[in-house]
Image (cartoon, rainbow, N blue to C red):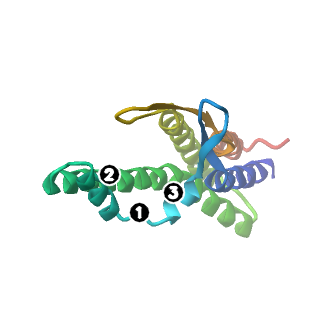
Amino acid sequence: MIARLLLVLAAIAGIAGLVLPLGAYKSPDGKIATRSSALRIIAEQPPDPTPLAKGAQDLGLSKADADRLAHAVDQGTTAYRGVMIAVFVPAALLALLALVVLVRREMGRTAGALAIILGLLSLAAFVVLLLLVGDLDIKETAVTLKLEATRGAGVYCLAAAGVLAAIGGTAAVRHVEF
């Protein structure tokens, strides 16, 4: 019973981590410059790189250099989106496992072992997010803007999902009831 409850709580925490902000970037005066959640990063279409290339050409870059810059930014945005999808795959699988366990009304050793594995993967994803959400320096020709990053609740929800799933999986594997 307790193993199933912990797994359901882990699934809820994983889903909350997907929709809650991963971080907020604040300018030196304390105003929030931007805030983002993984769902927003995954769901939104990447911006069109054509205006960036045109703006770079207006600043004096050749057409070939401007196109390379726009292509590099587009590839970076796509890669970041892919990382966000990969980071939240264990949380999505935890939610699916919790649904299966609730429908079956029992959590066996196999489901417990899967919960432990997915919990550890969620903890690894938490570490990846800790590394991704950091300070951001924007350097322009005349101005350098330092943005301070604060980690949001979404990052810590992923850690909670991992811990709860690992504990619940261990309880199911060992047949521990409280």
Q: Nearer the viewer, residue 149 or 90?
A: 149
Q: Is residue 162 visible?
A: no
**CB contact under 8 Å: marks 1 and 3:** no
**Residue on which the image places disc 1:** 47
In three-dimensional space, the C-alpha distance between marks 1 and 2, rounded to whole angstroms, equals 10 Å
Residue 104 location, quadrant: bottom right
Comes first in the chain, label 1 or label 3 = 3
Mark nearer the N terminus (1 vs 2): 1
Residue name at image x 64 percent, y 42 percent: 32
Q: Residues within 10 Å of mark 2 (few under 14, many from 20)?
A: some
SS label for mark 3:
helix
- Name the residue at the bottom extreme: 103
**What residue lies at 25% left-to-right and 50% top-to-bottom?**
69
Disc 2 residue type? Val
Instruction: Check the image and report above or below for 97 versus 28.
Output: below
Asked whether the viewer can see residue 83, the reply is yes
Q: Are marks 3 and 2 in contact (CB under 8 Å)?
A: no
Choose top left, top right, bottom left or bottom right for residue 177.
Answer: top right
- The local crowd at label 3, few if under 14, some if 14 to 19, many if 20 or more residues have their Cα within 10 Å, is some
Label annotation for residue 73: 2
Quick one: which residue is furthest to the right in this view?
Answer: 178
Between 29 and 83, the one lying in front of the other is 29
Residue type indicated by callout 1: Pro
Q: Which residue is mark 3?
A: 41
